[in-house]
Image (cartoon, rainbow, N blue to C red):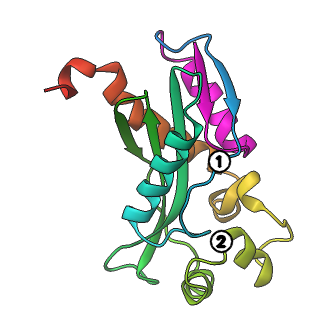
Amino acid sequence: MKIIVGSMNPVKIDAVKEIIKDYDFLAGAEVAGANVSSEIFEQPLSLDEIIQGATNRAKNAWQNCDYAFGIESGLMPVPMTKSGYMDITACVIYDGKEISVGLSSAFEQPVKLTKKVLEAKGKLDISQVALQIGLTTSDNIGYEGGMMGLLTKGRVKRKDYTKEAIRTALIQLENRELYNF
């Protein structure tokens, strides 16, 4: 069995490799990354854009494999938050015919960071803005512990909530009989 992850980000690829060990029907699968486009802005700014980006990544990665995983993080509007937005990750798994969608938990980014990301209208991502405003010295925190790792002081890393999104997408694959009409 072969799984392609629609990204070359090692956090996303390692998250998939680690999760599939817990699933008999995926255990032992070969996992590889593919450099594909999400076909959306650099920084998604709605749940629709996040899921569309993950779907595009999965479908664009689909080639000579059993499953393609698309993983996309972004900001979505959430009422009652300080910034008006929360960060969430979506995982879309594509089997050549159907998609399964899963989401991670969400968290609020710092208000100053969110404001700058919104001002950039999707053209700068969270990693770029975090570096710009001095929250990190990393030029790509998204390939490391992510902002979640920084904000929780290492208690929860980007890979952790990426795994949540993968697990929730796998619910539909593991229980196909409950999701097929």
Q: Residue at x 53, y 32 (%)?
A: 68
- Can residue 164 be seen in this snapshot? no
Q: Nearer the viewer, residue 109 or 65?
A: 65
Q: Residue at x 36, y 24 (%)?
A: 173
Kindly report the distance in space between the C-alpha atoms of the residues bearing marks 2 and 1: 17 Å
Total numbered circles = 2
Q: Where does the C terminus fall, quadrant-wise?
A: top left
Asked whether residue 131 is drawn in magenta, I would say no
Residue 160: x percent and y percent?
Answer: 59, 43
The circle drawn on residue 36 is 1
Residue 167: x percent and y percent?
Answer: 45, 33
Query: As displayed, is residue 129 above or below residue 102?
Result: below
The circle drawn on residue 125 is 2
Question: What SS does tag 2 mark?
Answer: loop
The reply, left or right, for residue 142 in relation to residue 19 is: right
The circle drawn on residue 140 is none
Range drawn in magenta: 1-24
- Callout 1 amino acid: Val
- Callout 2 amino acid: Asp
Query: Badge 2: how crowded within 10 Å, few (<14), some, or many (20+)?
Result: many
Mark sitting earlier along the chain (2/1): 1
Between disc 2 and disc 1, the foreground one is 1
Question: What SS does tag 1 mark?
Answer: loop
Q: Residue at x 56, y 70 (%)?
A: 41
